[in-house]
Amino acid sequence: MSDKDLSWKFAEDFVVESAVIQQARQHSLEQGVEPISPAMGAQIAVLAAASRAKTMIEIGTGLGVSGLWLMSGAPEAILTSIDIELDYQQSARKAFTEAGIPINRTRLITGRARDVLPRMNESSYDIVLVDADPHSVIEYVEHGLRLARAGGTVLVAHALWRGRVADPVQRDDTVSDYRSLLREIGESSAVHSALSPVGDGLLQLTKVGD
């Protein structure tokens, strides 16, 4: 194992997840839903806390792992979460309740993100997390930047897509979409951006003020 791989593994193992998040992670894996890694979860919690987020929205509820991490960083925030799978959201709701999150602090919307997002208020969110269909990542980030307030942050999970984005041999459509996104972001003056290698990549975009 290389030094970089050892450092990556150490960073992942460094994180201690709560029992509720561990259980949600196990349920996700049992359902074949890939949750964000512990280190990525810890990082988004830090970002939510540092921004003192009051309004957050995530594209892709899953079984609640990412939502639990967001709310751990910003327990006073309101989280809106969109997913097409009602069963997943019901599991997420149960996890939120077990974590002691008041029901009025989470709003779960069942539906296709591309249908729901155009109806959401622009410039209204402190944190936007994109963790859904990778084939729509560019579209979702465009919506995320519209929804984020000036100074707000859009987070894109899996931005290095299972280590494949950095491998020039990999050229499938999903990898190409992530590379296109990263290239466009790198050339944009509308955001401050950083790409973290935690998990399989967390892209962080803070919207420049008007």
Image (tube, rainbow, N blue to C red):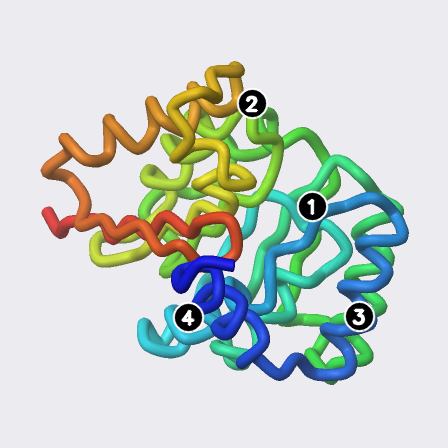
Measured Cα–Cα span from mark 1 to mark 4: 21 Å
Residue at the spot of label 4: 48
Residue linked to disc 1: 109
- Please give the residue where the numbered disc 2 appears in the rendered image: 135
Q: Can residue 138 be seen in this view?
A: yes
Q: Which mark is residue 95?
A: 3
**For the residues marked 1 and 3, what is the alpha-carbon distance in whole angstroms?**
16 Å
Q: Is residue 11 placed above or below 31 in the rendered structure?
A: below
Residue 141 horizontal/vertical position (percent): 40, 35
**Mark number displayed over residue 42:** none
Depth check, mark 1 against mark 2: the one in front is 2
Q: Are marks 2 and 4 in contact (CB under 8 Å)?
A: no
Residue 83 vs residue 66, the one in the foreground: 66
Q: Distance between the residues labelled 3 and 2?
A: 28 Å
Q: Position of residue 130 (x, y in %)?
A: 50, 44
Q: What element carries label 3?
A: helix
Q: Identify which amino acid the numbered label 2 is placed on.
A: His
Q: What residue type is labelled 1?
A: Ile
Q: Is residue 91 above or below residue 156?
A: below
The residues tagged by marks 4 and 3 sit, at their Cα atoms, a distance apart of 19 Å
* Left or right of 37 in this view: 52: left
